[in-house]
Image (cartoon, rainbow, N blue to C red):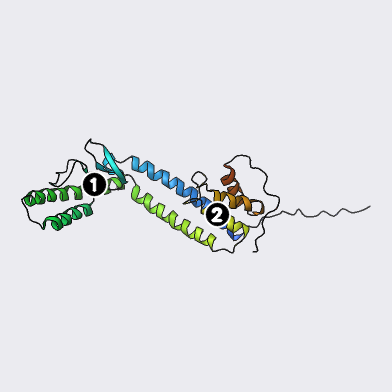
Amino acid sequence: MSSVIALPTIKLIHAQSELEKLWLEHRQLAIDHAAMTRAITEAVATMPRWAQPGPEYIDHRGARVGNIVDIPEVENLPTLPCEGAQHRVRFAHYHLRDELENRLKTFDGRGPEWPTFRKRWLIRCRVVRQREADQLQEQERAGLTDLWYEENEINAKLYDVRDAIRKLNPTVDTIAAVGLLNTTYWYEPNNVHRSKQSIMLLRHLQAAISVPSIKADVEMYLYQGQPNPPAPAVAPQVAA
């Protein structure tokens, strides 16, 4: 009677490479970064409109125009004699310094308008300084101070991970990973730059990619979640 030898079950374990560990860490950090961006946007929306980012100027029709800036809006400031129909409505202390320096350079501090300019400029200084202090209080109340700190922590980690990926030995996998990193500020599936060059590179490398997470992200980038066509039959070989 033949004896049957029971063989132990062998589990095939996929050993993560250094690249895959870094890529998965980058993935999670990118998710955290996107969540933090949403949290900051929601916190900003709870502040008064004047404390939120907004256009720098107001034009002759009363419409707010210009670049969006983070400094506070200050309404009903006394106008200076030299101001035109379009004037600034968002101020920081350095704008007041520039106003004074420009006045002194242009008129050397003299002229009949100087007393009026000086009086109104001093009022503007007091009002703007108070507005800046009020904005800081609103930001603190909204929790933005802590959120910005956490965002900076995530950004620093992302920089380190991206730098570590770029310093790895060049292989198909690392080239594909760097190719993905170059498509966006932080690699997020919904925030990518789809250039012909990056599509050609990643499509050329696709069949030879061995890291599962990078392969999945390459396919997502190339085909945006749609069924992907077959990869090229011959994949390029890059020496490790």
- Which of the 4 quarters of the picture holds residue 38? top left
The residue identified by callout 1 is: 134
Q: Residue at x 20, y 55 (%)?
A: 98
Secondary element at image label 2 = helix
Quadrant of the frame with the C terminus: bottom right
Q: In this view of the protein, can residue 48 be seen by the observer?
A: no
Q: Is the residue 57 above or below the residue 214 in the image?
A: above
Q: In this picture, is 15 found above or below 69?
A: below
Residue at 22% over, 54% down: 94
- 61 and 34: which one is in front? 61
Say which amino acid is labelled 1: Asp
> Foreground: 166 or 105?
105
Residue 63 spot, x, y in % from top left: 26, 37
Mark 1 falls on what kind of element?
helix
- Earlier sequence position, callout 2 versus callout 1: 1
> Going by the image, does 88 lie left or right of 27?
left
Residue highlighted by disc 2 = 179
**Which of the two discs, 2 and 1, sits closer to the camera?**
2
Residue situated furthest right in the rendering: 1
Answer with the quarter of the image where residue 110 lies.
bottom left
Picture mark count:
2
The amino acid beneath tag 2 is: Gly
Disc 2, disc 1: CB below 8 Å?
no
The residue that appears at 18% across and 43% down in the rendered structure is 84
Residue 25 in the image: x percent, y percent?
A: 53, 54
Closest to the observer, 102 or 94: 102
Q: Dot 2, crowdedness within 10 Å: few (<14), some or many (≥20)?
A: some
